[in-house]
Image: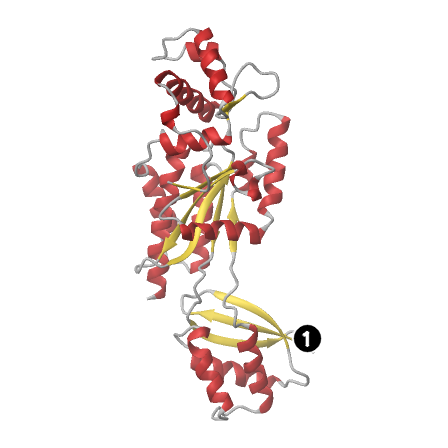
C-alpha cells in the first residue's frame, strides 16, 4: 500500500497492550462510526483488561497523536494519522471476495459497450459496492480516430466531431474562419478522416502539416485554413474526463450535524474537477493502490475524507487512467482496497482490448 506521507509513530513504538487496544478501537470505529469507550472495550472478547487500564493506554495513544476525543465524549476515535498506521501496519488485505469479483466482472466487462460506458459502469459499480462515490478518469493517451466531421453552429462557430476507433465521440468547439462555406467543412472533414483513420492526432499531425506546407493537399484555401486551425487547437491532445457516480451513497448512515457538514464540504470538493483529476493521476507514481486519508491531501482538508485510487494499464503496463472511491474515513478498507485494485485490472484489460 503506497501512502502519501508518513509522520506517525511506527508499530514498534507501541507495546503489545497498546497495539491490541489500538487495533480494537480502530476496528470498532470502522464498524460503527462511534467513539469507543474504555468500558465498551473491556467487554470485548479477548481483551482481559480493566476499564482503568484501558483508559490509561488510550490516554497514551492520544498523547502520541493516534487517538482523539470528540467534544466531551469519554470515547476515543482514531485520528487520520492513526488510521494511516492501522492501514499500513495492521490491516490484512487479500484478493476481493468471490461475490465482489463476480459483480465487478459481470457489470464492468459484461456486454458490448464503448469506452465511456465501460468507465461510467465502473464508477457506478464501485460506488454501489464500496458505499462511497466512485471516480474514474478517462484514458490520458490519445485515441486513434476513424472519422472527423465539422458542423456549423453559428456564423463564427464550428463544432468538430471526433469519432474514435473505439466508438467514443468527442466534440470540440472552434472559431470558424470568416466566410467559411459549407463545402469547405465537408472537404476538411473528409481530408482529416482519410489521413487520421487508425492513427492519433499526434501520430498524423506532422505528416499533415508537411503535406499542407508543400501544397500537396487538394484543398481550397478555406478548407486548408480550417484543417490548420484544428491541428493547432487540438495539439494538447484529448480532453480528460472525470466520471463521478454514487454521490447519494455519501448521505447514507449520517449520524450527526457535523456529518452532514462534512458531506456538504465533500460535495464541494467533488466539483473541483481539475483537482480530483490531478489527485487521481498521482496513482501514476504508485505501484498499485494508493490511499489518501483526510488532511494528507489539501483537497480533503475540510471534509476529512478518504480516497482509494489505483491506475488502470494496458498490456504493456502503460498507465492510461485511474479509478477509485472517495468517502468517509471509516470506509471498509479491507474490502474496498482489493476491490479498487481488481476493478482497475478489469478496466485495463477492456481498454486494451478496445484499442486492438
Q: Is residue 72 left or right of residue 135?
A: right
Residue 26: percent from the left, percent from the top?
Answer: 44, 24
Q: Is residue 326 left or right of residue 113?
A: right
Q: Is residue 292 left or right of residue 340?
A: right
Q: What quarter of the picture does the N terminus occupy? A: top left
Please indicate, yes or no, whether residue 243 appears anywhere in the rendered image. Answer: no
Residue 343: percent from the left, percent from the top?
Answer: 37, 47
Please indicate, yes or no, whether residue 99 appears anywhere in the rendered image. Answer: yes
- Crowd rating for badge 1 (residues with CA inside 10 Å; few <14, some 14–19, many 20+): few
Q: What quarter of the picture does the C terminus occupy? A: bottom left
- Front position in the image: 7 or 123: 7
Residue 138: percent from the left, percent from the top?
Answer: 47, 57
Secondary structure category for the residue under label 1: loop
- The residue beneath circle 1 is 154
333 shown above or below 321: above
68 shown above or below 267: above
Q: Residue at x 39, y 74 (%)?
A: 198
Amino acid at each position: 500500500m503506497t501512502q502519501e506521507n508518513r509522520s506517525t509513530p511506527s508499530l514498534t513504538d507501541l507495546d503489545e497492550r497498546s497495539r491490541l487496544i489500538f487495533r480494537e478501537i480502530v476496528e470498532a470505529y470502522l464498524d460503527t462510526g462511534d467513539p469507543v469507550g474504555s468500558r465498551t472495550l473491556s467487554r470485548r472478547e479477548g481483551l482481559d483488561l480493566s476499564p482503568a487500564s484501558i483508559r490509561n493506554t488510550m490516554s497514551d495513544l492520544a498523547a502520541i497523536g493516534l487517538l482523539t476525543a470528540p467534544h466531551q465524549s469519554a470515547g476515543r476515535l482514531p485520528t487520520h494519522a492513526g488510521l494511516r498506521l492501522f492501514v499500513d501496519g495492521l490491516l490484512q488485505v487479500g484478493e476481493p471476495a468471490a461475490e465482489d469479483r463476480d459483480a465487478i466482472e459481470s457489470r464492468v466487462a459484461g456486454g458490448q459497450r464503448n469506452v465511456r460506458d465501460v468507465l461510467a459502469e465502473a464508477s457506478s459499480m464501485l460506488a454501489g459496492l464500496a458505499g462511497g462515490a466512485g471516480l474514474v478518469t478517462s484514458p490520458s493517451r490519445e485515441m486513434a480516430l476513424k472519422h472527423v466531421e465539422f458542423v456549423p453552429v453559428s456564423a463564427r462557430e464550428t463544432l468538430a466531431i471526433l469519432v474514435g476507433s473505439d466508438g467514443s465521440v468527442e466534440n470540440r468547439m472552434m472559431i470558424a474562419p470568416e466566410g467559411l462555406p459549407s463545402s469547405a467543412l465537408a472537404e476538411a472533414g473528409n481530408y482529416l478522416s482519410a489521413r487520421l483513420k487508425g492513427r492519433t492526432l499526434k501520430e498524423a499531425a506532422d505528416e499533415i502539416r508537411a503535406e499542407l506546407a508543400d501544397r500537396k493537399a487538394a484543398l481550397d484555401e478555406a478548407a486548408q485554413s480550417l484543417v490548420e486551425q484544428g491541428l493547432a487547437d487540438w495539439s494538447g491532445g484529448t480532453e480528460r474526463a472525470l466520471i463521478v457516480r454514487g454521490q447519494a451513497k455519501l448521505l447514507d448512515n449520517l449520524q450527526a450535524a457535523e456529518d452532514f457538514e462534512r458531506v456538504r464540504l465533500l460535495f464541494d470538493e467533488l466539483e473541483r474537477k481539475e483537482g480530483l483529476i490531478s489527485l487521481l493521476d498521482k496513482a501514476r507514481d504508485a505501484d498499485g493502490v494508493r490511499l489518501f486519508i483526510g488532511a494528507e491531501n489539501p483537497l480533503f482538508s475540510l471534509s476529512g475524507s478518504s480516497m482509494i485510487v489505483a491506475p488502470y494499464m494496458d498490456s504493456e503496463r502503460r498507465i492510461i487512467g485511474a479509478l477509485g472511491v472517495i468517502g468517509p474515513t471509516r470506509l471498509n478498507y479491507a474490502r474496498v482496497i482489493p476491490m479498487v485494485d481488481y476493478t482497475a485490472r478489469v478496466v485495463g484489460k477492456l481498454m486494451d482490448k478496445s484499442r486492438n
